[in-house]
């Protein structure tokens, strides 16, 4: 009975280590995602959009993780012609 408790404890410690390792690996992607979201929201509300309106692009950027900000930067950003 005691052996089962020790085995479960060891598995729990291993899962915690795996979770910590995964968080360390994903942390740069999470930071990049939030940075892109804030940058795109700034562009949407300060510079405007090419197509759709600002509210639709805001919802896309906020709720379509990673691909929403990329889609805005490629398709929705207002182009400046020099």
Image: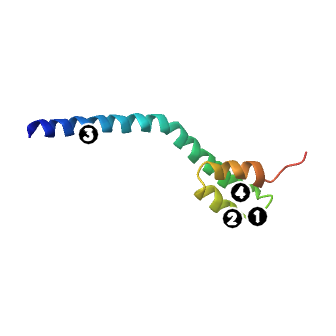
Q: Is residue 52 left or right of residue 16?
A: right
* N-terminal label among 3 and 2: 3
Please give the name of the residue rendered at 22% of the width and 34% of the height, measured from the top-left corner: 10
Q: Is residue 57 left or right of residue 2?
A: right
Q: Nearer the viewer, mark 3 or mark 4?
A: 3
Examine the image and state in which quarter residue 2 appears. top left
Please give the name of the residue rendered at 76% of the width and 59% of the height, measured from the top-left corner: 48
- What distance separates the C-alpha of mark 3 from that of mark 4? 45 Å
- What distance separates the C-alpha of mark 3 from that of mark 2? 43 Å
Image quadrant containing the C terminus: top right
User: What is the x, y in percent for residue 79?
Assistant: 83, 50
Q: Are marks 1 and 4 in contact (CB under 8 Å)?
A: no
Secondary structure beneath dot 3 equals: helix
Q: Nearer the viewer, mark 3 or mark 1?
A: 3
* N-terminal label among 2 and 4: 4
* N-terminal label among 3 and 4: 3
Secondary structure beneath dot 1 equals: loop
Q: Is residue 22 above or below residue 57?
A: above
Q: Return the residue at label 3.
A: 12
User: What is the x, y in percent for residue 26?
Assistant: 49, 38
- What distance separates the C-alpha of mark 1 from that of mark 2? 6 Å
Q: Are marks 1 and 2 in contact (CB under 8 Å)?
A: yes
Q: Return the residue at label 1.
A: 52
């Amino acid at each position: 009975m005691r052996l089962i408790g020790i085995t479960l404890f060891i598995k729990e410690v291993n899962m915690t280590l795996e979770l910590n390792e995964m968080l360390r690996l994903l942390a740069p992607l999470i930071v990049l995602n939030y940075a892109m979201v804030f940058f795109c929201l700034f562009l949407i509300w300060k510079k405007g959009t090419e197509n759709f309106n600002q509210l639709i692009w805001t919802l896309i950027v906020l709720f379509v993780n990673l691909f929403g900000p990329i889609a805005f930067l490629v398709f929705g950003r207002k182009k400046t012609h020099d």
